[in-house]
Image: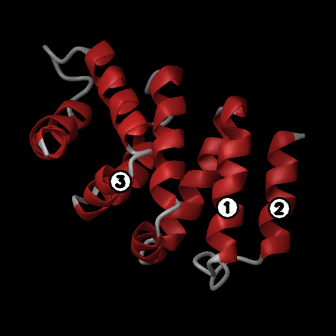
Amino acid sequence: MKLIALIKITIDIQTFACLDNNYADGVDPFACDMMVAMLQKLSLRRQQRIYMIESGLLEWLINHLHDKCRIISLYRLEYATALLMNLSLHRLAQARASKISSLLMSTLIVLLSIDYTSVSKVTHLIKLFQKRKILSRKFNTRDVFKGIFHIIY
């Protein structure tokens, strides 16, 4: 129970503030990187993953990756992508992601264009969201994978 309380405090108070102000004076980027890594590791546990989704971490993460993926460290980018994948495995996250499907798809395409180490994670996310019919309403599967193939090769 103490772990859940710690996670709630961490997500609610520190995470969003630290990561949103990462490039402000006095904020340690290394600490922010470690915070994302910690959240990614905790997201493997079902109860913590549900709380992260309910706290709005999924939407924040999609926006953060979309806006700052070119300026954050590769370490944070790798863990943030893994965190997004872990959160996206839950049906609640898929329902919430469907509300911002165009931003999600745009974010995934941007991620593919900058970081080749996350290609497998991003393509897995695209397949997952298309399987759940989150992206299929607006995006043709064949066109998406043609775009991915073009970016990679």
**Amino acid type at mark 2:** Phe
Identify the residue at the far front of this view: 1
| Whether residue 114 is situated above or below residue 122 in the rendered picture | above
Residue 107 place in picture, x, y as percent: 54, 53
Q: Residue at x 25, y 57 (%)?
A: 51
Question: What residue is shown with label 1?
Answer: 126
Foreground: 56 or 2? Answer: 2
Foreground: 34 or 103? Answer: 34
Q: Which mark is residue 49?
A: 3
How many numbered dots are placed on residues in this image? Answer: 3
Q: Earlier in the sequence, mark 2 or mark 3?
A: 3
Q: Neighbour class for label 1 at 10 Å: few (<14), some, many (≥20)?
A: many
- Kindly report the distance in space between the C-alpha atoms of the residues bearing marks 1 and 3: 20 Å
Q: Given contact means CB atoms under 8 Å apart, are the residues at marks 1 and 2 in contact?
A: yes
Q: Neighbour class for label 3 at 10 Å: few (<14), some, many (≥20)?
A: many
Foreground: 42 or 66? Answer: 42
